[in-house]
Image (cartoon, grey):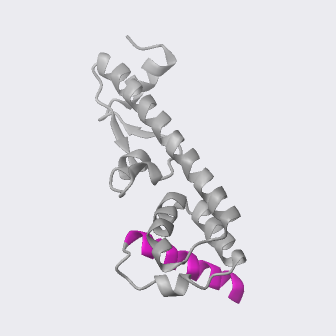
């Protein structure tokens, strides 16, 4: 691993750490980042699906003057707005899906992604991918219902 990649990862981790626990003194290490460093932090945040958490950190950091350049910040905000919209769409879909299965006597338990987002300071800032659900031992029946083969 090159020194440059290592430093980008360290700065990204400092930003993420500050977003999770701003009491720690990570602000000083973030106040001198170059434009390239900020782009690297945003890229790392995207790869790790924590763009929202890191944007929350930026909001907390602005009083310390540690902010990315305007073009990076605008792109970052746009990405998080997209995350928020997707979160809301997924929330509606989950409610509809749970209602469908409930009408057929199945309890649906949402696992991982969306379920874990409820533990975040701002739930819609957690990127979610696919939807993982558990049907309390009745997964085959749930599959049949979705395929239109159920009762």
Q: Is residue 12 magenta?
A: yes
Q: Which x, y percent locates residue 144?
A: 45, 20
Left or right relative to 50: residue 108: left
Residue 36: image location, x then y, percent: 72, 76
Q: Nearer the viewer, residue 53 or 48?
A: 53
Q: Which residues are magenta?
A: 1-20
Instruction: Work out whether residue 132 or residue 72 is closer to the camera in this orientation and state it.
Output: 72
Asked where in the image residue 140 lies, by quadrant, the reply is: top left
Q: Position of residue 35 (x, y in %)?
A: 70, 75
Instruction: Kindly identify the residue that appears in the image at 36 percent across and 40 percent down.
Output: 110
Name the spot of residue 75 as percent of width and height, x first.
Answer: 66, 57
For the point 47% across and 68% down, which residue is it?
Answer: 57
Quadrant into which the C terminus falls: top left
Q: Is residue 113 above or below residue 55?
A: above
- Between 104 and 37, the one nearer to me in the picture: 37
Q: Residue at x 56, y 63 (%)?
A: 48
- Can residue 84 be seen? yes
The majority secondary structure of the magenta stretch comes to helix
Q: Is residue 33 above or below residue 78?
A: below
Residue 104 in view here: no
Quadrant location of the N terminus?
bottom right
Q: Quadrant of residue 102?
A: top left
Give the farthest residue toward the top. 151
């Amino acid at each position: 691993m090159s020194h440059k990649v290592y430093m980008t990862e360290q700065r990204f981790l400092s930003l993420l750490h500050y977003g999770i626990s701003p009491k720690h003194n990570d602000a000083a290490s973030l106040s001198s980042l170059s434009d390239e460093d900020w782009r690297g932090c945003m890229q790392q945040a995207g790869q790790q699906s924590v763009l929202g958490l890191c944007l929350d950190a930026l909001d907390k950091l602005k009083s310390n003057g540690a902010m990315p350049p305007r073009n990076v910040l605008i792109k970052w905000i746009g990405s998080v707005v997209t995350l928020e919209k997707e979160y809301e769409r997924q929330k509606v879909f989950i409610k509809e899906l749970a209602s469908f299965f409930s009408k057929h006597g199945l309890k649906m338990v949402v696992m991982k992604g969306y379920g874990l987002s409820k533990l975040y300071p701002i739930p819609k800032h957690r990127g979610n991918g696919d939807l993982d659900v558990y049907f309390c031992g009745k997964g085959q029946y749930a599959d049949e219902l979705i395929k239109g083969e159920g009762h």
